[in-house]
Each structure stands twice: as C-alpha cells, then as structure tokens.
C-alpha cells in the first residue's frame, strides 16, 4: 500500500492508533481495570501503548515482518496473499512484544498477574493473539487500507 516513507509513516500511525485503542480497551476490560484506574492513568496506558507500538512497528517488528513475509512461499504477485502474509507476521511480532509491555504496565499500576511470570506471559500472549489476529485481518486492516487509500493516497495524486 504505502509507496513512500511518508506514506508508510501515515499508514503505520493509522494502524497503530486503531490497534492500540482496541487492544488497550480489550486488555483494560478483561482485567477489570476500567473502574479501577483513574482517567489520567487510562490515558497514560493508551499513550504509552501507542508510543511503544509505533516504535516497534517502525524499527523492529515492521521491518522484520515484511522480510519474513516475503520469504514465505506465497505468490507475491497476488495482493491478498502479500497482505495476509505481512499482516500475520506483524500480528505475531506485535503481540509478542506488546504482551511483554502489557505485563510491565500491569505491574507498574499494581496489578501483577497470578502465577509465574512465564505463565502470565503465555496467558497474556494467547488472550491478545485471539483478539488481535481477527481484529487486524477483519476490521482494522481493511478499515485502515480503505481510509489510507481515500485520504492519503488521494492527496498524493492531487
């Protein structure tokens, strides 16, 4: 979709914003933190999540996911296969790192998970993956690609 660095930045901002809003809300809900945290603490959760997700997308997960996706045995001339491969690799990488981030943030606000750290991480990873993967493929991916094409790509043509 994006063809320039500027377009890639806009696309990444749009995707990260949507995914962070949805996934942070999901995590706050499943951990019963909505009524527990103050409004300011929730805003900090959203902002910190966005900053970390954007940095991961731009510098670590994004470049690695694109390289990994193009090494998969897919037909690179078929746009749908490329989108599915890149999206799948992105979700796996982002859930891996953002689950670690979520555990750190939950410990900072005073609600550490129960059991061992490894089990807490695995539980968090699985809970996040089952939400993030369909959210990315069925909702945010198509929505952001549509908005990107309508507003960002349209400006580039004008």
Image (cartoon, helix red, strand yellow):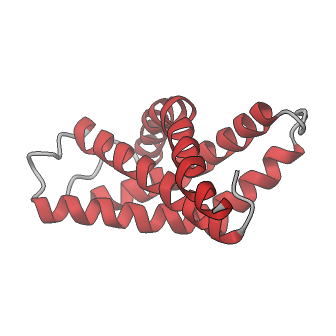
Instruction: Count numbered badges in the picture.
Output: 0
Residue 20 in the image, given as x and y percentages of width and height? 40, 52
Q: Could you say which is closer to the camera, residue 74 or residue 119?
A: 74
- Which residue is drawn at the image coordinates 31% and 43% (left, top)? 27
Q: Is residue 53 left or right of residue 90?
A: left
Q: Is residue 75 left or right of residue 131?
A: right
Measured along the vertical axis of the image, is residue 34 above or below residue 55?
Answer: above
Measured along the vertical axis of the image, is residue 32 above or below residue 44?
Answer: above
Q: Quadrant of residue 25?
A: top left
Q: Quadrant of residue 127?
A: top left
Q: Is residue 105 left or right of residue 29?
A: right
Q: Could you say which is closer to the camera, residue 10 or residue 124?
A: 10
Residue 109 visible in the displayed image? no
Quarter of the figure with the C terminus: bottom right
Residue 14 in the image, given as x and y percentages of width and height? 49, 55
Q: Residue furthest front?
A: 158
Measured along the vertical axis of the image, is residue 24 above or below residue 156?
Answer: above
Q: Could you say which is closer to the camera, residue 153 or residue 47?
A: 153
- Which residue is drawn at the image coordinates 67% and 60% (left, top)? 157
């Amino acid at each position: 979709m994006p063809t320039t660095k500027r377009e890639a930045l806009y696309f990444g901002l749009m995707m990260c914003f949507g995914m962070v809003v949805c996934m942070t809300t999901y995590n706050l809900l499943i951990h019963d933190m909505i009524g527990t945290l103050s409004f300011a603490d929730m805003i900090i959760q959203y902002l910190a999540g966005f900053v970390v997700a954007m940095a991961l997308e731009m510098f670590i997960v994004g470049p690695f996911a694109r390289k990994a996706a193009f090494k998969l045995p897919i037909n690179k001339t078929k746009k749908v296969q490329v989108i599915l491969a890149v999206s799948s690799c992105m979700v796996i990488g982002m859930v891996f790192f953002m689950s670690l981030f979520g555990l750190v943030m939950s410990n900072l606000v005073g609600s550490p998970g129960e059991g061992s750290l490894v089990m807490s991480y695995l539980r968090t990873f699985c809970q996040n993956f089952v939400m993030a993967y369909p959210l990315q493929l069925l909702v945010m991916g198509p929505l952001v690609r549509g908005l990107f094409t309508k507003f960002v790509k349209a400006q580039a043509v004008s």
